[in-house]
Image (cartoon, rainbow, N blue to C red):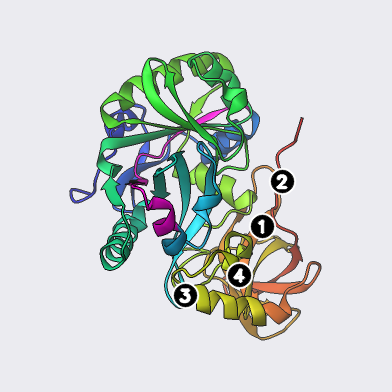
Amino acid sequence: MTDLRQTPLHDVHVELGARMVPFAGYEMPVQYDSILDEHRTVRSTVGLFDLSHMGEIELRGDEAVAFLRYALVSDPGALEVGQAQYSMLCQEDGGIVDDLICYRLEEHRFLIVCNAANHDAVLEQLERLLAHGDFGAELDDRSARTALIAPQGPSAAALLAELTDANLEAIANYHAAEGSVAGVTCLIARTGYTGEDGFELFCDARRARDLWAALMAAGESHGLRPCGLGARDTLRLEAGMPLYGNELNRETNPFEVNLGRVVKLDKGDFIGHAALQAIQQTGPRRKLIGLQMIDNAIPRAGYEVRAGPDGPDIGHVTSGTLSPTLGTKVAMAMVPAEAAGVGHSFEVVVRDRPQRAEQVKLPFYRRPRD
């Protein structure tokens, strides 16, 4: 693991006894104790995640809006200051380079948060488009200087309220605001990746240990538990959220993965516009669906999916697990669009044996609302 990068909290994770694994070029905690317990903690109280491996790229300039409208499939120009949107960077053929979140921090200043594994590809494409275009804007890669710590779960707001001067009620979902948390200056965002309420705290990497320690100490009375990549994956799968490298890649487009709503074809030209417009008109050839197993078998990524019963191989599982919250075995799978339909029967080949499954509506889990 000597070639792996480390987040500013690496030593903290080791001290806590986390099992460290390679992930997206970093050495990251996959679990501290039990993935199941960490998962249930996020669903019931609050879990604390180190997401400092993510990429943070700032864009500023008088023509920052025009550039991002050209570079991304969404319309960042529609954002108000303090608002965020889920978006994607695509190829000319509509293939997904990365999915990301775009924050409008000021009128001419934005923050792009991308996946760690795709950081270099995202930065390269943005730099290339900026250099070849005629846009008055500049990029600043803040990834190495930024830490990202995320308290997630129904008690996250109560925990954070004890430590911040920010008005958390004013930070709606997919919004962000500057504020101090335990004396550390942060961008406090509220987007989440777990299916629960939660916050993402961006701070100077040099203050990461202070912020983590304060959250851990204050979190004791809330049942807080540090959580690793294992729980993060099962949580996002229950919530039906795609993961780059599983559901998303350069061979898939937004319409195939039920994210056509992100694509704003009427905003004008952008990278991938012609291809995505054609896909919208004809409909995608494939579709990402949710499966619930009928037979007692756990579906895993890469397993073949058949048109059941006893049908031909038509697709594959992209992500699968035994859902800790629901107690059922669930998966997301890519199949031909004509085969998809809630209630349709499929088979997943598990250890060379076909196991019955039924298509269900995504997401598998929705958090209770007040």
Q: What residue does disc 3 label?
A: 251
| 273 is higher (above) or lower (below) than 122 | below
Who's the residue at 55% across and 37% down the image?
175
N-terminal of the two: label 4 or label 2? 4
Residue 143 belongs to the span the image colors magenta:
no
**Residue 149 screen position, x and y as percent:** 42, 32
Q: Which amino acid does label 4 sit on?
A: Phe
Q: Residue 326 carries which label?
A: 2
Where 166 sits versus 254, above or below? above
Percent coordinates x, y for residue 232 in the rendering: 51, 44
* Residue 255 badge: 4
Mark 2 vs mark 3, CA separation in Å: 31 Å
**Gap between marks 1 and 2 measured at Cα:** 9 Å
Residue at 34% across, 32% down: 13
Q: Residue furthest left?
A: 2
**Number of other residues with Cα within 10 Å of mark 1, as a class: few under 14, some 14 to 19, many 20 or more:** many
Q: How far apart are marks 4 and 2 (CA)?
A: 28 Å
| Image marks 4 and 1: residues in contact by CB distance under 8 Å | no
Over which residues does the magenta segment extend?
A: 45-68
The amino acid type found where label 2 is placed reads: Leu
Mark 1, residue position: 330
